[in-house]
Image: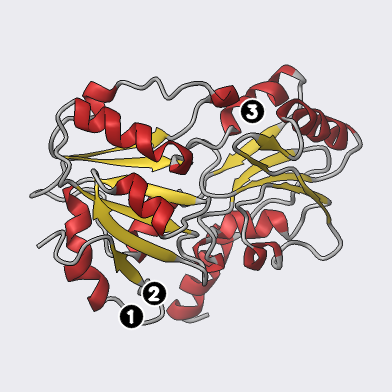
């Protein structure tokens, strides 16, 4: 066997996954929507699954890759409307595993980044169910890259913070706003569209200038993706005027200004449409 074939077999061996054991649960990140951003491990598991419990953020294109014989159960949630309560989802995971099925809990983005994956893992551990967790590309990383926004940059942002834009049981958005207002960082708000006004008010109250660049990215990395660039002061107005709907990320920070430079250089396939609240807002 020549050296090329030896290397190929080595790669195939390293990518091979052990069979998905009956009675196990895999908590799997499906990424932000583009099926090309699904990990190889995630793909192998969804193609072996007997049942897939998926949320509303898993794109139809990713669902097309699921084992055709698998039972697919929608257990999605959005603010103020839980299709299936979390307790029922937890019980389903346990029941199906106890029935010796191969169970995938498929989540948009990464299950351990604002995705309730930790809560489900705790429950499975308490019930004695064997599980594994497969990371996914979180929507902040996938959507920002698609739109020409580096989340960190030596000249503009030395840190990035992922923030929940709404609280459990729709509680008030009580966050450490002083820390979030620290200069030279990027803040990414997940599920924050309904609290755009509170985000603007609290960040400006703690010293972030109203002129700070902000991006709204709806359904990032999918063929329905759209993006608007505005300012912190104009964020609520832009979200309402341009009729943004969930799922929409809100990215706050100086790196947003780089979209003008970096997005046009990306291939046409991945370049998003960009609208503005004001002409020259970032000039």
Q: Is residue 272 above or below residue 170?
A: below
Q: Is residue 141 visible?
A: no
Task: Give the image location of residue 114, x and y in percent.
Answer: 50, 35
Q: Point out the frontmost of discs 1 and 3.
A: 1
Instruction: Please tell me in which quadrant of the rendered image residue 46 appears.
Output: bottom right
Q: Which quadrant does the C terminus fall into?
A: bottom left
For mark 1, give the secondary structure. loop
Q: Residues within 10 Å of mark 2 (few under 14, many from 20)?
A: some
Task: Give the image location of residue 96, x and y in percent.
Answer: 86, 37
For mark 3, give the secondary structure. helix
> Residue 26 versus residue 60: which sits nearer the camera?
60
Q: Estimate the spatial distance between the alpha carbons at disc 2 and disc 1, rounded to whole Å.
A: 6 Å
Instruction: Please tell me in which quadrant of the rendered image residue 267 appears.
Output: bottom left
- Could you tell which of marks 1 and 3 lies nearer the N-terminus? 3
Judging by the rendered image, the residue that carries numbered circle 2 is 270
Q: Is residue 201 above or below residue 14?
A: above
Q: Is residue 214 above or below residue 167?
A: below
Which residue is drawn at the image coordinates 42% and 25% (left, top)? 173
Q: Residues within 10 Å of mark 3 (few under 14, many from 20)?
A: many
Judging by the rendered image, the residue that carries numbered circle 1 is 267
């Amino acid at each position: 066997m020549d050296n090329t074939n030896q290397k190929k077999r080595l790669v195939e061996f390293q990518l091979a996954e052990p069979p998905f054991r009956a009675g196990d649960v895999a908590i799997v990140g499906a990424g932000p929507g583009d099926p090309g951003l699904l990990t190889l491990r995630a793909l192998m598991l969804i193609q072996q699954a007997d049942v897939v419990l998926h949320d509303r953020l898993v794109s139809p294109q990713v669902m097309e890759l699921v084992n055709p014989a698998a039972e697919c159960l929608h257990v999605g949630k959005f603010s103020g409307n839980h299709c299936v309560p979390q307790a029922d989802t937890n019980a389903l995971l346990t029941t199906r595993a106890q029935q010796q099925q191969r169970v995938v809990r498929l989540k948009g983005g990464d299950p351990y980044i604002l995705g309730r994956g930790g809560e489900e893992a705790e429950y499975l551990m308490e019930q004695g169910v064997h599980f594994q967790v497969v990371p996914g590309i979180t929507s902040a990383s996938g959507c920002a890259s698609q739109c020409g926004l580096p989340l960190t940059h030596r000249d503009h942002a030395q840190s990035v913070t992922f923030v929940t834009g709404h609280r459990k049981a729709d509680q008030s958005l009580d966050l450490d706003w002083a820390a979030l207002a620290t200069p030279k960082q990027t803040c990414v708000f997940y599920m924050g569209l309904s609290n755009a006004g509170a985000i603007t008010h609290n960040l400006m109250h703690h010293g972030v200038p109203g002129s700070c660049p902000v991006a709204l990215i709806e359904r990032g990395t999918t063929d329905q993706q759209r993006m608007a660039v505005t300012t912190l002061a104009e964020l609520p107005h832009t979200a309402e005027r341009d009729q943004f709907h969930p799922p929409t990320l809100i990215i706050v920070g100086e790196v947003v200004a780089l979209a003008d430079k970096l997005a046009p250089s990306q291939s046409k396939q991945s370049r998003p449409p960009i609208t503005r609240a004001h002409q020259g807002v970032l000039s």
